Amino acid sequence: MASLQKDETRSFSLLLDTYQKPLYWHIRGIVKNHEDADDVLQNVFIKVYKSIKNFKGDSKLYTWLYRIATNESLTFLKKRAKQAQISSEELQDRIIENLESDVYFTGNDIQIALEKALTQLPEKQRLVFQMKYYQDMKYDDISEILGTSVGALKSSYHIATKKLTSILTSD
């Protein structure tokens, strides 16, 4: 019994070591703020720890973790907007305004402009763009994470890039 717990602890530590940094950056891309990303990441690993026994292997472990991280991030943002009694769009605008003063944000003016433009996209297009452009994920993996067909994702990405180009060149 003790040996089994030791193996589970070792396995979870390996999982944490392997996925902590990439999941942090995935979450950070959604919530934008370092402290919020840390909070969400902690919630993700608590959820993973509690439900890892239920993982059936129907999907890759990687996409299962990213799905949890994505859902936790979106839930976090919805709660934050509700607490502030503002719309999700208004929350996104506030987050981007705060991004420029965030000591953990290392982007330049072009990055700020792109982040502002991203807030103008619908949620799914924004997620697809971030996963494909920033994280260079494969469409098959994004499909598993978001529960959407590859064809729909390709279309969302194409539309997102056209909208972003239009937004960024109209300023």
Image (spheres, rainbow, N blue to C red):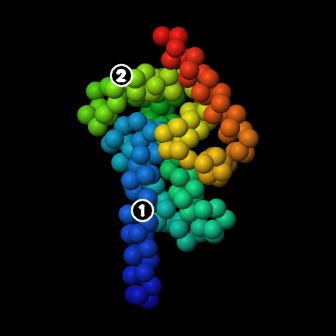
Q: Is residue 162 visible?
A: yes
In this rendering, position of residue 47 left or right of residue 112:
right
* Residue at 49%, 32% in the rendered image: 82
Residue 159 against residue 124 in the figure, above or below: above
* Residue at 39%, 44% in the rendered image: 37
Residue on which disc 1 sits: 18
Which type of secondary structure does the marked residue at label 1 adopt?
helix
Q: Position of residue 83 (x, y in %)?
A: 44, 33
Residue on which disc 2 sits: 109
Q: Which residue is farthest top?
A: 171
Kind of residue indicated by mark 2: Asp
In this rendering, position of residue 130 left or right of residue 36:
right
Kind of residue indicated by mark 1: Thr
Image quarter of residue 153: top right
* Residue at 57%, 58% in the rendered image: 64
Image quarter of residue 59: bottom right
Q: For this rendering, which residue is in front, 101 or 110?
A: 110
Q: Position of residue 136 (x, y in %)?
A: 53, 44
Q: Position of residue 20 (x, y in %)?
A: 40, 57
Image quadrant occupied by the N terminus: bottom left
Sequence-first tag of 2 and 1: 1
Residue 133 against residue 58 in the figure, above or below: above
Q: Residues within 10 Å of mark 1 (few under 14, many from 20)?
A: few
* Residue at 34%, 41% in the rendered image: 34
Give yes or no for contact between labels 2 and 1 (Cβ–Cβ under 8 Å). no
